[in-house]
Each structure stands twice: as C-alpha cells, then as structure tokens.
Image (cartoon, coloured by chain):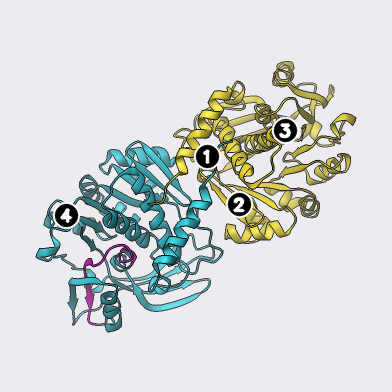
Chain colours: A yellow, B cyan
Amino acid sequence: MSLLVVGSLALDTIETPFGKAERALGGSATYISVAASYFIQPVRLVGVVGGDFPKEDIEFLKEKEIDIEGLQVKEDEKTFFWHGKYNFDLNSRESITTDLNVFADFDPVIPGQFRKSTYLCLGNINPELQLKVLKQVEKPRLVVADTMNFWIEGKHEALMEVMKKIDVFIINDSEAREISGEANLIKAAKKIQEMGPKILIIKKGEHGALLFCENDLFAAPAYPLESIYDPTGAGDTFAGGFIGCLAKTEDLSYENMKRAVIYGSTVASFTVESFSLDRIKDLTAFEIKDRFNEFKQLSVFTSA
Amino acid sequence: MSLLVVGSLALDTIETPFGKAERALGGSATYISVAASYFIQPVRLVGVVGGDFPKEDIEFLKEKEIDIEGLQVKEDEKTFFWHGKYNFDLNSRESITTDLNVFADFDPVIPGQFRKSTYLCLGNINPELQLKVLKQVEKPRLVVADTMNFWIEGKHEALMEVMKKIDVFIINDSEAREISGEANLIKAAKKIQEMGPKILIIKKGEHGALLFCENDLFAAPAYPLESIYDPTGAGDTFAGGFIGCLAKTEDLSYENMKRAVIYGSTVASFTVESFSLDRIKDLTAFEIKDRFNEFKQLSVFTSA
C-alpha cells in the first residue's frame, strides 16, 4: 500500500485565548502527512513552499519518513502565510491575513512513481487543483477529500466535479449544511451522498464526528479535553489518521472505517492540545493506542 | 420502588416550520410522567391545573397509570399557558406568550403516602418550589432535577441550594455554560459537580448527551432523525425515561446509569417526531427496546 497526500504547506500565525504562535509550521498537507505517518511510512507528499520555508521543517518532515520528492520549493517566492485569531470559545475564528504567495499559482505535479499510489488524500485546496491531481493518478483504491466554506462558495462547480470522483468526503457540520442547504445533518448527509461520495464524514468539533457509510451511520464521540490550546489542524489530522489507518490495514469494511474514524479522532485530539504540530511531532504508538482505548470507554454500554 | 414527579402541567401553543399545535397538552411534569410510565407504574404526579384543563387529558394521564392524587385542580383559574415559536433549524425558540395563571402561586403539597417515594424527579419549575418539595419528602434514594436559563438568572441562590440536595442534575449545554461560566463543557461539568450533584447530564440535542458520573464520562449519541417536528418536551421525556429506567431496575451503578441515559434518549427521540405528546401517547415496549438497540449500533466499534 502507498499513500499520497496533496495539499498546502503553510506558515501560520495563530492567536488563541491561551497564547500566540508566530510563523509556525502549518498547512493541510503538513498536518495530514504527519498524522498519517503514525500509521504508514513513507507518506508521499505533494505541495509547494517558498524559499523562506524553514530548513528544519523540511528536516522534520523527512524524519517522519515523509517522501518530499513531490514538494516544489520556489526559492524566490514566499510560503503560503495565514494569520488567524480564534474567539474565546475556540468555535469560530477570524482570518486576519491570508497571503497565498507561492500557492497562488500552484500547479500540482505528481511524480511518476507517486501516480500509482493506492490511497490518495486531497487536503483542503482549490477544488480545481484537486481535479488536476485526480487526472494524474491511476485508479487509487480509495480517495479521501476535504474542503472548506471558501471553496463551497467560490468554486462550487469544480467542487461538485470533485465530489463525483472521490470515495470519502470529510467536512464539518457547517460546511455540510452549506453544501446541502439542509439544517438537519441527517438530511444534509443524504443529499451530499447523492452528489457523489458514498462515504461522508461530518466533523462536529467538541461533539465528535458522524460517519455515513452508504446507509449506515456511526457516531464517534469527542475526546473530553478540558483545555484546547489551538484547534488549527484538527480536521486535517483527523483525515490523516483516518486514511493512514485504512492504508495500513488495507481493510475498507464498514467495521474498519469506524475504527479509522476513531484513530482520526485520536490524532486530532492530540493536535489541539498544543500550538501548531507541537503535540503530534513525537507521538508514540502507545499514546495513540491508549487514547484509542479511552475513546472506546467513552461510548460503550451494555444491554440489561 | 416508587417514583414521584413534581413539575408543571401546561397547555402549549407551538409553532414550528412544520406546523402548529394549539393549546396542546404540555408541561414538564406531564412529559416526565408519561415517559416514566413506560418503565414504572404508577407514577406519582404533583402539580396544578385550572378549570380549563381538558377532562380528556386527565383521563389520558389516568390511562397511563399516573396517580394524580397530588394534582391540584383550581376550577376558577386557568392552566399555565405557553406559546412558543421555533426557528427554522429548531435549535432556538422564542416565547411569544407565557401566562403562569394557576402556576403563579403554586404551592406543591406532597400527599402523605407520596412522601416516602424512593425516586423523585423535580421537573423544571422555580427552584424555590423544588426546595419546598425536597423539605416534604423522606430521604428518597435518588433525586433528579432539571432547570432552565430563566431560573439560572432569576433564582440563582435557590438553584444553588437545590443543587446541594440532589443526586442527578439534568441540563442542556447552554445552561451548563451559563451556570459554570465556562465555555468548555468538560470544565463546566467539573465546576457544576463541585456545586453539589455528583452526577450531571448535559443534553446536547442533535449531538446527544454527556453523562458525568463522579470521574467517569459517558457520551451518548443522538438518534438520527431526518425530521424533527417539535422539540418541546424532549428534555423532560429524557429525564422521565432516565429516572423511570433507574426506578424500575433499582440499580444505581454507573453501568445502569449509562443504560438509563440511552433509555432517556430513546423516549426523547420519539417525543420530537410529532407535536405535543402525540408520538409518546401509545409507545409499545417493543418500539422502545428496538430503538434502544438501534442506539447501540450507532456507537459500537471494535478494536483491530
């Protein structure tokens, strides 16, 4: 098995009620790859950075056995930069600065040996770019894609095309409501599944996640965290843990999809415990398994 | 075992995007008693109505084996009336009219043989009245209480007194945040448990419910409903199913508390399928057990 991840690499300045991180490592592809690296190695990464991208961040990705052959480095340009500020309850945020920089004219080129990857994760980028990636790969066994409200509004047609070509769509509850035009999430999910993806995951932050798999529904709880320092990357690491688990086990059964959702939730729960990728830089297999088991205790009950 | 329920009986006019019900049977004690009647009979009811309270509603309560000896009927006065209008996504509502009527000077009197009830459910009423009830009962094995934002703001001191005297406190997420002053629900729960109740249930509507039992946490999923016609009474029937299950089984272990939360969720999920008590007037044991089992399928997953 082999896993290809395409998305953004970024430098993020993040403000939360608990502090501030400046020009810290971020980006959808970064978070996804690092999360997936705990399940499968190497993870194949395709993205673009500028000359200002720290050498130690490149080294860190390599340490995580992330294959950066597909990483374009444009020495004379600047890396994608985002400055966001979260409100007091961390449920909403304001984008203070979004400098696309090198990302403005990103043209994803999938290296030859990456094109036969059996698992593909399309991080949150312009759906037109996601379509370009889909044209270059050769029948992956499973394609997972993420998006965001910005593309739902601005690139609707391309996003609808993407949805027809993917297997698993991962979005949050407000995005699900926006795409479907339905307030009720169960109705929303049915409508979205009719748009293409047989499998839909709706992330609900502190309320967990819902996995819609054809006609089945699995409700995953959220890990109870008293302190969430930085929600950035939670959704991406969820996707990375999810597809990483599937690629490792090569089992696409509903039962295993459920486990993959819990592994995704597990990695995401670590992500938000600190700024940037700080908490998930050096997770151990024991930490991950231990928290997976804690998830189980959260929702188990027996009849009579 | 014996279960005493004290709360309001009301006539509700309810508007939702799906229709309108006029002067329909409502009130916290009504919903709680009917829900609990599927687990234990008779349920002992204490409340007050006016001369306009329909005779057929009295008959209905009797049919459900609800003991109305403690129901005060003030022939020359009017029953508590509420007119509410829900917004399009049913997550918020506006109170158009609240006529306390007979409820304005309600003085709960617990009949002699009701005072030794082993289980007590205090529906959402003025906490000063909840305290009056607590003074009249003789060491119930378990006391469950509900409240609402109106009392959190208006009768803070009395509510704090109630919280010291009860075992299980059932509130929704916004109420939990308001009482504790904490945005994070896990932090909020710890603070509320320190105020008195060892067991706290936070209802989250479409996101399920959280049971905090001393240091344990159980996350119950919500039943996936595509159409919610009327959320009125969902919280009350949750409480009724919860305490009804506990009173029936007489098992206050954490394992059984979890089952009781699922039974509460089960009855609540029926309640919202139609206006007023229409859907829960004639539930069968089979329907309840069947949906309980569906809840199980929603959240179960296995390791490796």
Q: In percent of the image, x 32 and y 60: which residue is there?
A: B240
Nearest the camera: B248 or A219? B248
Mark positioned earlier in the residue sequence (1 or 3)? 3
The amino acid at mark 4 is: Leu
Expressed as whole percent of the image width and height from the top left, the position of residue B71 reads 19, 72
The image quadrant where one finds the N terminus of chain B is bottom left
Residue B38 located within the stretch drawn in magenta: yes
Amino acid type for the residue under numbered disc 1:
Leu
Tell us which disc is closer to us: 4 or 2: 4
Q: Nearer the viewer, mark 3 or mark 2?
A: 3
Q: Is the Cβ of the residue at disc 1 closer than 8 Å to that at disc 4?
A: no
Give the CA distance from mark 1 to mark 3. 22 Å
The span shown in magenta is B35-51
The secondary element bearing badge 1 is classed as loop
C-alpha separation, residue under disc 1 versus residue under disc 4: 39 Å
| Mark seen at residue A174 | 2
> Mark number for residue B108?
none
- The spot of residue A9 in percent (x, y) is 73, 30
Indicate which disc, 3 or 2, sits on the residue closer to the N terminus. Answer: 3
Q: Is residue B182 visible?
A: no
Residue type, label 3? Ala
Q: CA distance from mark 1 to mark 2?
A: 15 Å
Disc 2 element:
helix
Foreground tag (1 vs 2): 2
Q: CA distance from mark 4 to mark 2?
A: 43 Å
Which disc, if any, is residue A90? 1
Q: Amino acid at mark 2?
A: Ser
Find numbered disc 4 in the image and state the secondary structure of the residue it sits on.
helix
